[in-house]
Image (cartoon, rainbow, N blue to C red):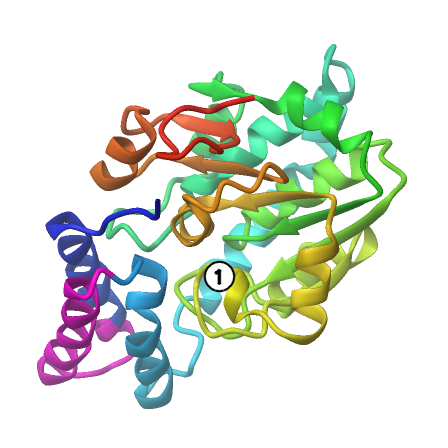
């Protein structure tokens, strides 16, 4: 069962696109057009990432400030997280469970998100949060599954979060094939191939674009190398709410989700309180419980 979009989704889009349109130097008429498209799609029960994709394509085409309106923020957070990299790696390696610590930190980095219409965290504030326990923590189960696998596919999310993804892939002793999938085009502050390379992910994984113009991975829309990689992966780590919204309800035991609960729709669907950090599978019929 996929997530059911509600009025909260439209309100979230309204807050987000108000900022997006201003950043792109567009008008209130443009805003109304873009939101109108989103509202129609949500009324058709289209999942949020796909519901907003057409509006994002139009915004990129019409933007007066370039097609990547969050380029500076993406570069800033990637640089700042890279400055923390060596110290965090040292701290994690001295812990009893370095890989789990890195996965947990990567979950909390999902807070680097412009899609909810809230201010981005300060770097030092974010680094402090990285040590917080997760509300649902199945990192140990994921690692057990990982070491029984031959290939890992990570579905990336935000730029900056990418650095913590690299840190996990750097720390892990998993020797199988590692693949990292990015967004095809700039959308919000999600990572494209260029952003993933800036984070150094090409040093630890094979990079691949999703090939679809959606801020989430929808398996049936994938083609070519992206589809082949997704279908053949033994284990999949889906980062962020966009990928959760796209994949929720498919009940694929290969897929583990890593995200922070940022909206009531996701909170109701998963049964996890707002603000909770989650690393879990969702493989029962309704998706609400993290079944092992």
Q: Is residue 84 visible?
A: yes
Q: Point out residue 115 in the picture as x, y percentages from the top left corner.
A: 32, 55
What residue appears at the point 61 percent right and 63 percent down from the top-left corner?
Answer: 195
Pick the residue in front: 253 or 103. 253
What residue appears at the point 71 percent right and 20 percent down from the top-left corner?
Answer: 91
- The image quarter containing residue 105 is top right
Q: Point out residue 98 in the picture as x, y percentages from the top left corner.
A: 73, 21
Q: Give the residue number, with chain letter if any, for mark 1.
A: 218
Query: Which residue occupies the extreme top position in the image?
Result: 96
Query: Which residue occupies the extreme right position in the image?
Result: 175
Residue range of the region highlighted in magenta in the rendering: 21-45
In this picture, residue 109 sits left or right of residue 272 = right
The C terminus - image quarter: top right
The N terminus - image quarter: top left
What residue appears at the point 74 percent right and 44 percent down from the top-left corner?
Answer: 234
Pick the residue in front: 263 or 142. 142
Pick the residue in front: 237 or 199. 237
Q: Is residue 157 magenta?
A: no
- Figure check: 261 above or below 193: above
């Amino acid at each position: 069962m996929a997530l059911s979009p509600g009025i909260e989704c439209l309100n979230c889009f309204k807050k987000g696109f108000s900022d997006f349109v201003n950043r792109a130097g567009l008008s209130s008429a443009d805003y109304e057009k873009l939101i109108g498209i989103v509202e129609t799609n949500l009324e058709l029960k289209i999942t949020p990432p796909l519901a907003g994709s057409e509006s994002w394509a139009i915004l990129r085409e019409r933007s007066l400030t370039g097609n990547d309106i969050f380029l500076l923020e993406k570069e800033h957070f990637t640089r700042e997280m890279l400055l923390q990299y060596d110290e965090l790696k040292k701290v994690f390696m001295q812990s009893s469970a370095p890989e789990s610590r890195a996965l947990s930190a990567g979950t909390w980095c999902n807070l680097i998100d412009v899609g909810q219409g809230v201010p981005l965290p300060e770097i030092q504030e974010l680094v402090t949060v990285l040590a917080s326990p997760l509300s649902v923590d199945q990192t140990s189960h994921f690692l057990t599954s990982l070491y029984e696998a031959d290939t890992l596919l990570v579905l990336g999310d935000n730029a900056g979060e990418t650095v913590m993804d690299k840190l996990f892939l750097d720390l892990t002793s998993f020797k199988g094939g590692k693949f990292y999938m990015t967004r095809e085009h700039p959308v919000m502050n999600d990572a494209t191939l260029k952003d993933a390379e800036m984070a150094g992910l090409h040093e630890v994984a094979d990079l691949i674009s999703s090939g679809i113009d959606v801020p989430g991975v929808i398996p049936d829309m994938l083609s070519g190398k992206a589809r082949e990689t997704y279908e053949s992966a033994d284990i999949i780590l889906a980062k962020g709410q966009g990928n959760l919204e796209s994949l929720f309800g498919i009940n694929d035991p290969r897929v583990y989700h890593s995200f922070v609960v940022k909206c009531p729709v996701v909170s109701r669907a998963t049964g996890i309180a707002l603000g909770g950090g989650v690393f879990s599978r969702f493989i029962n019929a309704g998706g609400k419980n993290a079944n092992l």
